[in-house]
Image: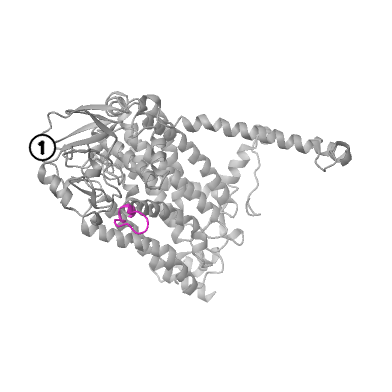
Amino acid sequence: MSFKWAKPYEPKNPFMRWMDERLPLPRLAYGAIGGGYPVPRNLNYFWNFGVLAGIFLTIQIVSGIVLAMHYYATTGGAFQSVNQLIMRDVNAGWLLRYAHMNGASFFFIVTYIHIFRGLYYGSYKAPRELVWMLGLVIYLLMMATAFMGYVLPWGQMSYWGAQVITGFFSAFPLVGEPLRVWLLGGYAPDQAALTRFFSLHYLLPFVIAAVVILHIWALHIPGSGNPTGVDVKDERDTLPFHPFYTAKDGWFAAAFLLLYALVTYFAPNYLGHPDNYIEANPLATPAHIVPEWYFWPFYAILRSFTVDFILPAKLWGVLAMFGSILLLFFLPWIDRSPVRSGSYRPVFKRFFWLLVADVLILGYIGGAEINAWRVAVGQIAAAYYFLHFLVILPLVSSFETPLPLPSSISESVLHGEAEEAAPMGQKKSRRGATATAA
Amino acid sequence: MATKAQSAEVPATADSGGDGVRRRDFLNVAAVSFAGVGGVAALAPLLVQMAPSADVLALATTEVDISKIQPGQGIKTTWRKQPVFIRNLTPKEIQEANAVSLSDLRDPQTLADRTKPGKANWLITLGVCTHLGCVPLGIGEGENRGPYGGYFCPCHGSMYDTAARIRQGPAPKNLEVPEYKFTSPTTVQIG
């Protein structure tokens, strides 16, 4: 499970020795997140977001369990319990609720950075295909959890979000409508739907935690990737996770949590929608109905299908939306280039940034009010999203000439004594140049 | 392990019925099948509990007094917790609906198909957009009825005509006409 130079676990005192012989949990932790896990020494800050995602999952579980102690899962009481009881009456309830609300947004922010890190540095490539796929499973579970959580306050956006999202299922021929009614336990979102969403919203985070363990387990078999994409060769390429990366993760988490605190305390509703402070009304849809920001790109893809073509437009929209994520499960086999890191792939790199821009455009379109030109822009952006993965990536990986790779991680970091000691501002050799020289 | 070792020691002919099937194999298959069927049967209550319960189904009919609805007006009521639009069409709206040729429609139906004989002015539909289930605008006075004079869904821009048929936008079907009957000239029972 690790490199052969990984430091073995040595119990420090008789109690730990006694423990190790009976339940070697400290040994497991030492090998997974302690000094016994060697990590490439050249990780940049994009590698901090996995740990951050774990921190936000913990924040969500802790704040969520406490909120559940004060929440009423009834159509008559849910809105009241959130907006009166929790926000005004419960001691520190407002803080817990805002922390949970914004915690969800920040969980998605760090997860998106984590995913795009993986896309740029080819983290999905062999031998880490399962790490990538388990990550996508976590992402899908997160989306389901976030959606059901958003329904719980039973505001206008909660209610109509539930109506629209369960409406996706009615797009499927024959089984669609019965399936929708079965999922809701009624013909429209009501008590039955609210209670089951609450139950599942409480369950799924623990399922996520379990898949996170699998994700980390699968990662620790080959070990962490790194910005060069070059495999670890010997001890000079790695550092023990503790104290090196625990320290780096620790300080970065503190810095990032500052940003989270800033939003939670000073702009707690910035990422939400004001209509969710109106109690659910099954007889009136809000004029501008949008999901939470982290679903906007997918919502834009959904709305891009306006004409029937063999299948009804509605079914196309739903299929494309689900397809846009399911597609990513095949990414390790779509991108055939043996070079992992985008830093050494000049053509891929350009298309990567185009994809980032494309997803941002989709996000803007998905969140904006619908009009003719926005639909057109959304259609082009949605088409480009699929073009990127289905056409551009396979072509690029077969035609591109990658830059020469460094022969090892340590060589890419250490440029030799003379250069390391050179004063600030003095010209250092570029990474590519070092690689060529080698 | 013990069973395996034991059965290996016993000569095959000893407990097989001469057709090569050992009694132990039969017992294994039977035991696992029994548990399997039981396990699947245990799923049934877990699945049916999700379906609409008796109290939800009990709301299956609604009676509505329509005597106060003047031509050109409409009301919004509920049936099975879903909004229902009851609209008293004006002669002009009926004419507009009848003037459309069926080949221009995504979900071809005439106004007569969607109303009761002799009651062509009473258009009763669910107020649930067939795209993703929003409530279209247009039943209330002064609401946006869209370019076809029927209903306009604000969520994704589906537009319905005066017979509540889909004309433009992403919705695949006309607004659904629920089952209903006139129990008296001024009362409608939906469901």
Determine the residue positioned at 52% across, 76% down. A437
Determine the residue positioned at 51% across, 52% down. A133
Q: Which x, y percent locates residue A37?
A: 58, 49
Residue A352 versus residue A401 in the image, above or below: above
Please name whichever residue, A38 or B165, is drawn nearer the observer in this view of the structure. Answer: B165
Q: Residues within 10 Å of mark 1 (few under 14, many from 20)?
A: some
Residue A73 appears in the rendering: no
Determine the residue positioned at 26% across, 27% down. B62
Residue A159 appears in the rendering: yes
Please name whichever residue, B63 or A207, is drawn nearer the observer in this view of the structure. Answer: B63
**Residue range highlighted in magenta:** A301-313
Q: Which x, y percent locates residue A435?
A: 51, 72
Residue that badge 1 annotates: B71
Q: Is residue B24 left or right of residue A47?
A: right
The image quadrant where one finds the N terminus of chain B is: top right
Does residue B120 show up magenta in the picture?
Answer: no
Q: Which x, y percent locates residue B33?
A: 67, 36
Residue B55 versus residue A225 in the image, above or below: above
Type of amino acid under label 1:
Pro
The image quadrant where one finds the C terminus of chain B is: top left
Q: Magenta region's main secondary structure?
A: loop
Chain letter for the residue marked with disc 1 in the picture: B
Q: Is residue B3 left or right of residue A351?
A: right
Residue A422 versus residue A285 in the image, above or below: below
Residue A88, quarter of picture: top left
Mark 1: secondary structure = loop
